[in-house]
Amino acid sequence: MKRLPYVLGKVLGGLMAVAGFGAAVYVYTHRIALPSADAMACLLVGIGGLVIFRFSSWLLMKRSGNDDGPTPGVNEKMKTSAIPWIILLVLAAAFVIFMLFLGR
């Protein structure tokens, strides 16, 4: 339960990144007559999502060191840290591909 806010922060950051970058791709590929500030706002939402995701991940790793269990090795920490990034990148790529097919 102590980790729940950090996990929710990672979920929120991941969703923001996917939605922000996906919306930016949609605006750029459909040549919508919107000011470029709208596309930049989408990119800023995506970047903000990545920052929130990374910060929550860092806090989660920092807080998880307080457990009484055995200390995981460096390889296990790297693998555990890489899994959320892989999931985020796969979801972002799937969303971008979905938006490109939706726009055709």
Image: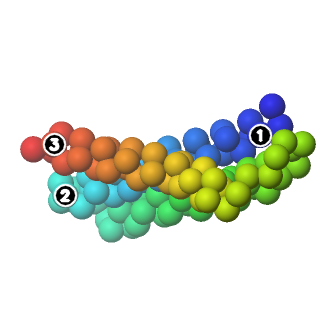
| Residue under pointer 3 | 101
Front label number (3 vs 2)? 3
- Which of the marked residues, 3 or 2, is nearer the chain's N terminus? 2
* Residue 65 in view: yes
On the image, the x and y values in percent for residue 59 come to: 75, 55
Instruction: Tell me the SS state at disc 2.
Output: helix
Q: Nearer the viewer, residue 89 or 18?
A: 89
Q: Is residue 84 left or right of residue 70?
A: left
Q: Nearer the viewer, residue 47 or 61?
A: 61
What's the distance in space between the residues labelled 3 and 1, CA to CA? 37 Å
Position of the N terminus by quadrant: top right
| Residue under pointer 2 | 29
**Label 1 amino acid?**
Arg
Dividing the picture into quadrants, the one containing residue 74 is bottom right
**Label 2 amino acid?**
Thr
**Label 3 amino acid?**
Phe
Query: Vertical placement of 26 versus 102: above or below?
Result: below
Front label number (3 vs 1)? 1
Q: Residues within 10 Å of mark 3 (few under 14, many from 20)?
A: few
Query: Vertical placement of 88 versus 58: above or below?
Result: above
On the image, the x and y values in percent for residue 95 come to: 32, 44
- Which of the marked residues, 2 or 1, is nearer the chain's N terminus? 1
On the image, the x and y values in percent for residue 27 come to: 27, 56
CB contact under 8 Å: marks 3 and 2:
no
| Residue under pointer 1 | 3
On the image, the x and y values in percent for residue 38 come to: 38, 60
* Residue 45 in view: no
Instruction: Tell me the SS state at disc 3.
Output: helix
Q: Nearer the viewer, residue 24 or 97?
A: 97
Query: Vertical placement of 38 versus 98: above or below?
Result: below
